[in-house]
C-alpha cells in the first residue's frame, strides 16, 4: 500500500454502529424499562428465542474481546489471577471475571445490568460450562438454563441428537424464559424472527463468497470479524440485521465489480499478493498491529474458520422457520467448533481449493483448547492434501502478555517469503508448460 | 518378600505396562474378544464386558515413556495427557485394540478423538458424550443412545449382541469391584499406614488393564492383608487430594505428598473406577436402563460434570469431613482448564468450612517433587501446629 487512502466510511459501518449503540443504550436502561437480561455465549446462541421473549442479550465473550481491544483485559486478567485463577486457563473467562470484579463496566463505559437468566448453550467448547458455573456463583439470583449441545462426533447431526435438544428446549430452556419474563412462548413470533434470519444468512453467504473473486474485495478474517458481528450475536432475526447485510452485500458487490481490494484501517489495499485461508481466532489486544502485518505485505484472507463460529452457513445450512425448534437445535450443533476434527480439515481443504488460496495459516490461541488442540495435525493434513505452504503462529485472545509482535512479524515474514518463492516456481512451471 | 508385597509388585508392573500385555494376552486367548481402550475418566466398562470385551483404561504415559513424537502434535500450552497417548499410539503400544472411547471431559480429549479418527487408529473411535441434563426422559435417553452406539461399534467387530443376563452379570462384577475398592478406602481412612497411597494407586490402576474378575481377586487379597494391622502409624496429617481426575500425577508426586507427612485418605486418581457411588441394580430386566440411572443419580463429582444445583465445592467439603481429613491438597495438571477453573470456587468452599488447603500443579512426566515436598511439609506442619 504505497499511498494509503483515507478509510472509507461505508454505509454498512454506520448502520452497524447505530445498531450497537441502540443495543447498549437499551441495556443501560434495562432496569428502568423492565426489560429482562439474558447472559449467553456466541457459538450456537439462541438469539431468536431471546428476542421472542423480548429479552436483551449480553455476551461475556464479546465483553472480553472488547476489553481486549480497549486495552483493559491485561488488568482484568491479573485481577482474576489474584483471586486464584490459574495462568493457564482460558483468558476470556478470566477477563470476564476481572471485569466483574471491577464493577462490570461494559464497552460504553456504563455498568452492564445483572442477568435475569444465565442461558448456557456450550456449543463447541467445554470451557463455557466452567465459565457458567463461575457466573452462576457471581450472580446467585439469576435463573440458570442449560442446553447441552451434543458434539458432531461422528461427523453428522442425527435425529436423536435433534430430539434431545428439542426436548431440552421445551422442558428446560423455554420454561425458564417464561418464568423469568412472565410471558408465554409464542411460536409464531419465533417463526417470524427465523424468517428474517434466513434472509440475513443468504446475504451473509453471498458476501463471504465474494472473496472467490480475484482480487478479493473483502478480507474474510480481519474485516470478517466486523462483518460477522450482527449475524453471530445480538441481531440475527431482526429486520435491521437483514438491512445491514443487504447494504453490506451491495457495497461488496460494487467493490468486486470495480475490482477493488479490501478496505483496511489505513485505506484501500492496492495489490493482492497472497490469498490466505486462516484458522483460529484473532488476537484482540493488538488487533490493528496484527492486521497491519498482513495488509502491508499484500496478504488478503479469503476465507477463515473463525467467522464460522456462529454457523457454517456457506455449506448450505439455513434456519428453517417451518420447524423452529428443530432448526435452532440443528443450528447449535452446526457451528464450526462443534464439528469434529476430520470435518474441520475437510472444510479447510475445501476453502483452500475453492478460494484458490496460496497458503494456509493457523493462529493458535494459547488458552483456547477448543480451537487449538489438534491444530498441528490439521496443519499437516492440509499441507498433504493441498500442497500449499502452511504457516503457524501463536498468540492469545485477550492476554497481552502472550502477544509478541516481533516474534509474530518474523514468522509471518518468513512465511510470506516461502509463499513468494512458491509463486515464482509455479509461474515458471506454467510458462514451461 | 511378603505376600502383599508380591501382589503390589504385580499391580505396579501391570499398571504401568504401556504395552498392555495382559490385556492383549487376554484377547488372544479366545476368539471374538474385543479390546476397547478408553480415556479418563468414567466409562461404563460393564457394557463392553457384556459383549465379550475388555475395556482398558488408557491413562497416559506418565513418566514411563519419553515423549518425542507426541510433542510434535501438541503445542506447549496443552496438557500432557494427550501427547503421551499420541506417543503410545504412534509407537504401536495401542495396536491390537479394536476401538477407542473418548469420554466427554474437555476439548483436548474431544479433539484427540478426532485425531484418532484422522489416523484411523482402531476400528472405531468414539467420543462418548456425557449428557449434562440429568432427567431420565432427556439426559437418560441421550446417555442410553451413547451406550448403544458403543454396542453397535463392538458388534461390528465381533458380531456379538448383549443380553440381559450378560449385562447383569457384568454389573454384578463391577459392583463387587467398586465395593472392594471402597472398602480399601474405608480401611485406609482409619489406618492409612496399612497401605500407602502409592500402593493403593498401583492396585487401582492395574485394574484398568486386566479383566475385572482377576482384579476382584487381587482386591480381596489386598483387603485381607490390610484388614490386619501392618506398618506403623506416623504423626501425619490426613488430606484429600483433588484435581487429578484426568491426567494422572507422576507417582513421585504422590510419594512426595506422603513423605512430607500427609496421609492421603481420599483422592480423585483413577476416578472412573469409583465414579458410580454404590451399587447398580444387577437384577433389572433393563440393565442398560440401570446403568443409565446410575450415571444420572449416583455419579460422584469432578470438573467435567456440570454442577449447578449440586456444587462441587460443597461436595468436596462433605468428602473431606466424611473422611475426617485435616486439609485438602489441590493438585491439578498444568493447563487443565476444567480442574483449574474449578479451583478458586472449591478453595472458597474449603475456606468457608475452615478446611486448610494447599495447591500444586504438575505435568504427568515431571513434578517439581522437591518443591512440592517442601510445600506439603509446611502445610502438614502448620496444620499440626494449629489444630
Ligand atoms: S476456550 Fe476458546 S472457545 Fe472456549 S470460551 Fe475460551 S476462547 Fe472461547
Ligand atoms: S488433563 Fe484436563 S485438560 Fe488435559 S485432557 Fe484431562 S481434563 Fe482435559
Image (cartoon, coloured by chain):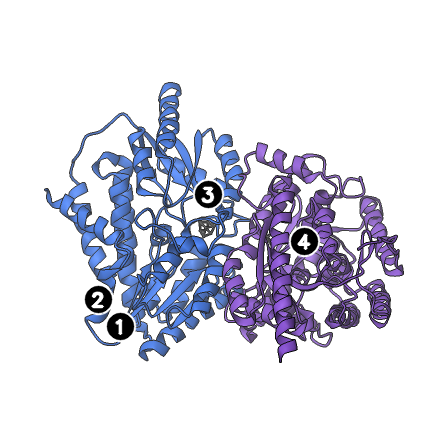
* Residue identifier under label 1: B33
Residue B355 image offset from top left, x and y in percent: 44, 30
Residue A211 falls left or right of residue A306: right
Question: Disc 2 vs disc 4: which is toward the camera?
Answer: 2
**Inter-mark Cα distance, 4 to 1:** 47 Å
Query: In the rendered view of the protein, which quadrant contains the C terminus of chain A?
Result: bottom right
Q: Is residue B31 left or right of residue A265?
A: left
Q: Which chain is purple?
A: A
- Label 4: chain? A
**Residue, x 59% and y 52% (percent of image)?**
A393
Q: Disc 2 marks which residue? A: B26
Of marks 1 and 3, the one in the foreground: 3
| The chain in blue | B
The residue wearing badge 3 is: B334
Viewer can see residue A196: yes
Tell me which label, 3 or 2, sits earlier in the chain.
2
User: What residue sits right under mark 4 in the picture?
Assistant: A40
Marks 2, 4 in one chain: no
Q: CA distance from mark 2 to mark 4?
A: 49 Å
Q: Position of residue B271 (x, y in %)?
A: 37, 50
| Marks 1 and 3 in Cβ contact (< 8 Å) | no
Q: Nearer the viewer, residue B112 or B382?
A: B112
Amino acid at each position: 500500500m504505497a499511498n494509503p487512502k483515507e478509510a472509507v466510511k461505508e454505509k454498512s459501518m454506520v448502520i452497524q454502529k447505530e445498531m450497537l449503540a441502540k443495543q447498549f443504550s437499551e441495556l443501560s436502561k434495562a432496569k428502568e424499562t423492565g426489560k429482562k437480561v439474558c447472559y449467553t455465549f456466541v457459538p450456537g446462541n439462541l438469539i431468536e428465542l431471546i428476542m421472542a421473549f423480548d429479552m436483551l442479550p449480553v455476551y461475556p465473550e464479546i465483553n472480553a474481546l472488547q476489553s481486549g481491544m480497549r486495552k483493559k483485559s491485561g488488568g482484568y486478567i491479573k485481577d482474576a489471577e489474584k483471586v486464584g485463577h490459574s495462568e493457564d486457563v482460558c483468558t476470556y473467562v478470566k477477563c470476564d471475571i476481572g471485569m466483574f470484579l471491577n464493577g462490570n463496566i461494559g464497552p460504553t463505559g456504563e455498568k452492564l445490568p445483572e442477568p435475569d437468566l444465565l442461558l448456557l448453550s456450550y456449543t463447541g467448547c467445554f470451557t463455557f460450562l466452567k465459565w457458567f458455573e463461575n457466573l452462576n456463583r457471581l450472580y446467585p439470583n439469576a435463573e440458570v438454563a442449560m442446553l447441552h449441545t451434543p458434539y458432531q462426533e461422528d461427523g453428522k447431526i442425527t435425529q436423536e441428537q435433534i430430539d434431545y435438544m428439542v426436548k431440552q428446549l421445551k422442558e428446560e430452556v423455554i420454561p425458564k424464559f417464561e418464568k423469568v419474563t412472565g410471558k408465554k412462548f409464542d411460536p409464531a413470533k419465533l417463526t417470524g424472527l427465523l424468517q428474517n434470519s434466513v434472509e440475513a444468512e443468504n446475504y451473509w453467504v453471498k458476501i463471504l463468497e465474494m472473496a472467490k473473486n480475484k482480487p478479493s474485495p473483502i478480507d474474510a478474517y480481519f474485516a470478517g470479524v466486523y462483518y460477522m458481528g450482527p449475524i453471530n450475536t445480538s441481531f440475527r432475526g431482526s429486520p435491521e440485521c437483514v438491512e445491514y447485510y443487504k447494504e453490506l452485500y451491495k457495497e461488496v458487490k460494487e467493490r468486486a465489480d470495480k475490482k477493488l481490494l479490501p478496505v483496511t484501517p489505513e485505506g484501500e489495499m492496492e495489490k493482492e499478493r497472497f490469498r490466505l485461508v486462516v484458522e483460529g481466532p484473532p488476537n484482540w489486544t493488538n488487533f490493528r498491529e496484527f492486521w497491519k502485518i498482513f495488509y502491508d505485505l499484500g496478504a488478503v484472507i479469503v476465507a477463515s474458520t473463525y467467522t464460522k463460529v456462529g454457523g457454517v452457513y456457506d455449506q448450505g445450512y439455513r434456519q428453517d422457520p417451518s420447524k423452529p425448534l428443530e432448526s435452532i437445535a440443528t443450528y447449535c450443533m452446526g457451528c464450526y467448533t462443534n464439528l469434529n476434527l476430520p470435518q474441520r480439515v475437510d472444510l479447510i481443504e475445501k476453502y483452500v481449493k475453492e478460494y484458490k488460496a496460496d497458503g494456509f495459516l493457523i493462529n493458535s490461541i494459547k488458552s483456547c483448547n477448543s480451537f487449538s488442540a489438534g491444530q498441528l495435525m490439521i496443519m499437516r493434513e492440509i499441507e498433504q492434501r493441498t500442497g500449499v505452504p502452511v504457516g503457524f503462529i501463536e498468540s492469545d485472545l485477550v492476554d497481552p502478555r502472550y502477544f509478541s509482535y516481533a516474534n509474530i512479524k518474523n514468522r509471518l515474514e518468513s512465511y510470506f517469503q516461502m509463499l513468494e518463492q512458491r509463486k515464482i516456481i509455479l509461474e515458471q512451471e506454467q510458462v514451461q508448460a | 518378600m511378603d505376600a502383599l508385597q508380591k501382589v503390589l509388585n504385580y499391580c505396579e508392573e501391570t499398571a504401568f505396562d504401556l504395552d498392555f500385555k495382559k490385556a492383549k494376552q487376554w484377547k488372544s486367548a479366545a476368539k471374538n474378544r474385543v479390546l476397547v481402550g478408553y480415556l479418563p475418566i468414567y466409562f461404563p466398562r460393564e457394557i463392553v464386558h457384556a459383549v465379550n470385551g475388555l475395556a482398558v483404561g488408557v491413562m497416559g504415559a506418565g513418566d514411563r515413556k519419553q515423549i518425542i513424537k507426541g510433542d510434535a502434535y501438541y503445542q506447549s500450552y496443552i496438557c500432557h495427557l494427550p501427547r503421551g497417548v499420541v506417543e503410545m499410539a504412534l509407537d504401536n503400544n495401542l495396536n491390537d485394540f479394536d476401538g477407542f472411547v473418548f469420554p466427554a471431559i474437555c476439548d483436548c480429549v474431544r479433539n484427540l478423538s478426532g485425531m484418532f479418527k484422522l489416523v484411523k487408529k482402531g476400528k472405531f473411535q468414539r467420543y462418548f458424550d456425557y449428557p449434562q441434563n440429568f432427567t431420565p426422559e432427556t439426559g437418560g435417553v441421550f446417555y442410553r443412545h451413547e451406550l448403544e452406539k458403543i454396542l453397535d461399534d463392538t458388534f461390528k467387530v465381533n458380531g456379538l449382541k448383549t443380553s440381559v443376563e450378560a449385562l447383569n452379570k457384568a454389573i454384578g462384577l463391577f459392583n463387587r469391584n467398586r465395593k472392594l475398592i471402597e472398602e480399601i478406602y474405608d480401611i485406609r481412612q482409619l489406618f492409612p499406614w496399612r497401605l500407602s497411597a502409592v500402593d493403593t494407586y498401583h492396585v487401582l490402576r492395574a485394574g484398568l488393564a486386566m479383566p475385572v474378575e482377576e482384579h476382584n481377586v487381587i482386591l480381596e487379597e489386598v483387603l485381607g492383608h490390610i484388614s490386619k494391622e501392618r506398618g506403623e502409624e506416623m504423626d501425619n496429617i490426613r488430606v484429600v487430594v483433588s484435581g487429578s481426575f484426568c491426567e494422572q500425577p507422576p507417582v513421585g508426586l504422590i510419594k512426595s505428598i506422603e513423605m512430607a507427612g500427609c496421609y492421603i485418605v481420599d483422592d480423585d486418581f483413577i476416578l472412573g473406577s469409583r465414579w458410580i457411588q454404590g451399587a447398580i441394580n444387577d437384577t433389572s430386566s433393563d440393565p442398560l436402563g440401570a446403568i443409565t440411572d446410575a450415571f444420572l443419580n449416583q455419579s460422584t463429582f469432578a470438573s467435567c460434570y456440570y454442577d449447578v444445583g449440586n456444587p462441587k465445592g460443597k461436595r468436596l467439603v462433605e468428602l473431606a469431613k466424611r473422611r475426617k481429613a485435616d486439609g485438602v491438597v489441590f493438585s491439578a495438571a498444568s493447563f487443565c482448564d476444567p480442574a483449574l477453573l474449578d479451583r478458586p470456587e472449591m478453595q472458597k468452599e474449603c475456606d468457608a468450612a475452615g478446611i486448610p488447603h494447599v495447591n500444586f500443579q504438575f505435568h504427568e512426566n515431571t513434578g517439581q517433587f522437591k518443591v512440592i515436598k517442601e510445600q506439603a511439609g509446611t502445610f502438614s506442619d502448620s496444620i499440626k501446629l494449629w489444630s
